[in-house]
Image: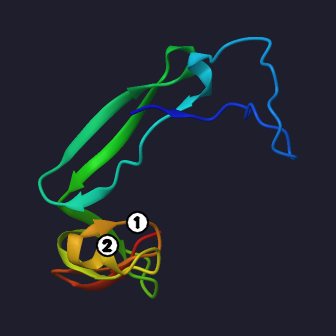
Amino acid sequence: MALWQGKSNRKSTGGRLSPNRGKKRSEIGRELQQAKVGGFTKKVARARGGGRKDRLLKIESVSITDPKSGKSTVSKIVEVIENSANPNYVRQNIITKGSIISTEKGNAKVT
C-alpha cells in the first residue's frame, strides 16, 4: 500500500480545504524495509531522476573494527542481542542502527 506524504486536505480547525490539484507520484513514500539475519538479499528501488536505492533485506556477515588496533575483519552474525529502537526486534532478529549483535568474534554495535 502506498504511503501518501502530501499536504492534508483539512485545516487546523478541522474544516475542509479544496485542493487545486491531485496527488503526485513524487509525494508517495515507501514502506519500511527491515534488515534481518540470514543469507544476503537486497532489493533495488527506483529513486527520483532514475537513480537507484539498494534496500537491504537480509545479511549474514558484518565487518567488525577493533577500536584498539584499528584492524577490520569480516565475521558471521549469530543473532541480535539488544535493540533500543524496539524490544520486539530482538526476537525477530531485525538489525537497525545502534543495535547490538552477537558475532563469531564477540558482540558488536551497528553504526
Q: Which residue is mark 2?
A: 89
**65 lies above or below 28:** below
Residue reaching furthest to the front: 15
**Residues at marks 1 and 2, CA–CA distance in whole angstroms:** 9 Å
Label placed on residue 47: none
Residue reaching furthest to the top: 21
Do the numbered discs 1 and 2 sit on residues whose CB atoms are within 8 Å? yes
Q: Colour scheme in the image? A: rainbow
Could you tell me residue 52's position as x and y percent?
Answer: 44, 26
Sequence-wise, which precedes: disc 1 or disc 2?
A: 2
Q: State left or right for residue 106 relative to residue 33.
A: left
Could you tell me residue 10's position as x and y percent?
Answer: 77, 36
**Residue visible at 73% across and 35% down?**
8
**95 lies above or below 4:** below
Q: Secondary structure at mark 1?
A: loop
Q: Quadrant of residue 18?
A: top right
Q: State left or right for residue 100 relative to residue 19.
A: left
**Residue visible at 31% across and 72% down?**
89
Q: Which residue is mark 1?
A: 96
Q: Quadrant of residue 72?
A: bottom left
The kind of residue on which mark 2 rests is: Tyr
Q: State left or right for residue 72 relative to residue 59.
A: right
Q: State left or right for residue 62 relative to residue 98.
A: left
Q: How many marks?
A: 2
- Say which of marks 1 and 2 sits in front: 2
Residue reaching furthest to the left: 39
**Residue visible at 17% across and 49% down?**
40
Figure quadrant of the N terminus: top left
